[in-house]
Amino acid sequence: MAARVCQIVFGRKRIVHGRARDEPGFIHRSGVAWIGQSVLVMSSRDAEELATRLRSLGVRVAMAPVTIPHTSLDASGGRVRSMLDDAEWERLSTLYNGWINDVADVLQGLATAAQDAERSVEGPPIARAVVADLRTRIEAPIGELTDRTNTLTVEMAKFQA
């Protein structure tokens, strides 16, 4: 799924009948700015289209309206200039990336534990039901952590606006 998401967002080259063909991604559209990580700024129309395509793949999507003054865009009209100096942005980025890595490790550990528990149960139906309940209870915080991390990513983008 991650590869397909990258193709939609960043585009790809395909070989069709021996000829290379570019398939531009959303970042190549006029008025779309790639802030970094998984944050894009675009019109609400483009955002809805992208969200629909990503959700059809089972991707969790967070969106928030932001206002970016024209003076905050670089000369190309694309990338947004930071309101933080380089040292502040580096510190914030380091904290954010550390958080993302920690959350990913926790989520992977929870998912692995749930899968291991399901595989280990071959006994009576009550044991399988207990493990299924455990998996359901684990999946809820995984979804919440994912949603909160997506929201954090969107909020981080506002620092660059």
Image (cartoon, rainbow, N blue to C red):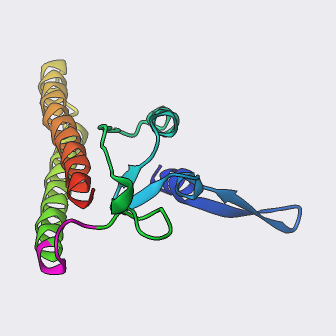
Please count the marks in the image.
0
1 left or right, relative to 111:
right
Q: Residue at x 58, y 52 (%)?
A: 29
Q: Nearer the viewer, residue 23 or 85?
A: 85
Point out residue 100 in the picture as x, y percentages from the top left corner: 19, 59
Q: Nearer the viewer, residue 57 or 62?
A: 62
Q: Residue at x 39, y 40 (%)?
A: 59
Point out residue 82 in the picture as x, y percentages from the top left corner: 25, 67
Q: Quadrant of residue 14?
A: bottom right
Q: Quadrant of residue 18?
A: bottom right
Specify whether residue 36 is in view: no
Point out residue 60 in the picture as x, y percentages from the top left corner: 34, 38
Residue lying farthest to the front in this orientation: 71
Above or below 94: residue 66: above
Above or below 102: residue 46: above
Above or below 62: residue 129: above
134 left or right, relative to 111:
left
Q: What segment carries the magenta color?
A: 82-88
Q: Residue at x 45, y 46 (%)?
A: 42
81 left or right, relative to 117:
right
Q: Quadrant of residue 103?
A: bottom left
Q: Does the magenta run of residues contain 94?
A: no
Specify whether residue 79 is in view: yes
Instruction: Pick the quarter of the image with the C terminus.
Output: bottom left
102 left or right, relative to 13:
left
Point out residue 157 in the picture as x, y percentages from the top left corner: 26, 55
Above or below 85: residue 54: above
Residue lying farthest to the right in this orientation: 17
Q: Residue at x 13, y 53 (%)?
A: 106
Q: Nearer the viewer, residue 105 or 159?
A: 159
